[in-house]
């Protein structure tokens, strides 16, 4: 595949990530359709797409994105503190710094028993939906999805709690291809919030 086509797919997908809050996978697939390319077309990697997202945010959202990201990170901290018994780690756009008010929050929980998180939410009177999603190693994991009001943005934000086994935590801490952490715990997120405030 020519690098020009790869770049065009990534740029189109980046717009969908920022403007519609899509995750990377769905954004790349929809970009193919929007560009009229065949579904078997090779897709750009996540590093290229993430760079395009950063570029798009700087170009079109520079005046609002930093405050929206900070608000989402503060809301993520609230949920991570509520669920700190399950070793929460933030991932996705809110962790990477590319999130806008349209982005959902993705928190990974590492539990000794996968039902513990559900029971904890029920005990707190939190309503949630359960779905099966693909985990960070391609395995199927439960996602507990909540709508949580974000006072700073004055809107409801999707918070998705991905439930992993405790043993998965070690592999979760490996860095990405550029040596950056793929997710962060409460202390790491608090540091990002403090640095931005």
Image: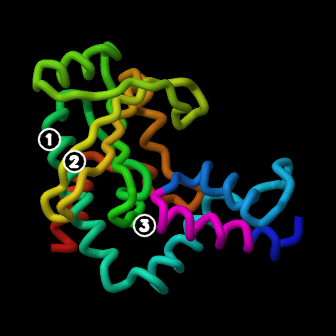
Q: Position of residue 32 (x, y in %)?
A: 75, 59
Q: Position of residue 51 (x, y in %)?
A: 57, 72
Image quarter hosting the C terminus: bottom left
Give the answer, above or below, for where 163 lies relative to 56. Answer: above
Category of crowding for the residue at label 3, using alpha-carbon neighbours closer than 10 angstroms: few (below 14), some (14–19), many (at least 20): many
**Badge 2 is on which residue?**
186
The part of the image, by quadrant, that contains residue 127 is: top left
Bounds of the magenta segment = 8-21
**Badge 3 is on which residue?**
98
Visual colour scheme = rainbow
**Alpha carbon of mark 2 to alpha carbon of mark 1: how far?**
7 Å
Front disc: 3 or 1: 3
The answer to which of marks 3 and 1 sits earlier in the sequence is 1
Front disc: 3 or 2: 3
Side of 118 relative to 103 (left or right): left
Give the answer, above or below, for where 58 lies relative to 82. Answer: below
Q: Nearer the viewer, residue 181 or 161?
A: 161
Q: Position of residue 128 (x, y in %)?
A: 28, 28
Side of 76 relative to 171 (left or right): left
The answer to the question of whether label 2 and label 1 lie on touching residues, with beta carbons closer than 8 A, is: yes
Category of crowding for the residue at label 2, using alpha-carbon neighbours closer than 10 angstroms: few (below 14), some (14–19), many (at least 20): some
- Disc number at residue 81? 1
Which residue is at a point 21% across and 16% down the rendered structure image?
119
- The dominant secondary structure in magenta is helix
Q: Position of residue 33 (x, y in %)?
A: 75, 57
Image quarter hosting the N terminus: bottom right
Category of crowding for the residue at label 1, using alpha-carbon neighbours closer than 10 angstroms: few (below 14), some (14–19), many (at least 20): few
- Disc number at residue 126? none
Which residue is at a point 19% across and 33% down the rendered structure image?
83
């Amino acid at each position: 595949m020519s690098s020009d086509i790869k770049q065009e797919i990534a740029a189109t997908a980046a717009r969908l990530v920022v403007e519609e809050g899509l995750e990377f996978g769905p954004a790349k697939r929809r970009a193919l359709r929007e560009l009229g390319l065949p579904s078997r077309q090779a897709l750009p990697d996540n590093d290229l797409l993430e760079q395009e997202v950063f570029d798009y945010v700087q170009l079109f959202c520079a005046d609002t994105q930093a405050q929206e990201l900070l608000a989402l990170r503060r809301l993520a901290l609230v949920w991570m503190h509520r669920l700190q018994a399950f070793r929460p780690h933030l991932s996705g756009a809110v962790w990477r710094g590319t999130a806008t008010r349209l982005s959902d929050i993705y928190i990974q929980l590492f539990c000794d028993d996968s039902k513990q998180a559900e029971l904890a939410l029920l005990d707190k009177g939190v309503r949630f939906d359960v779905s099966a999603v693909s985990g960070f190693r391609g395995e199927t994991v439960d996602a507990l999805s909540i709508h949580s009001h974000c006072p700073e943005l004055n809107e409801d934000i999707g918070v998705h709690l991905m439930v992993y086994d405790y043993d998965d935590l070690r592999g979760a801490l490996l860095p990405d291809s550029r040596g950056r952490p793929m997710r962060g715990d409460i202390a790491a997120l608090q540091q990002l919030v403090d640095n931005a405030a």
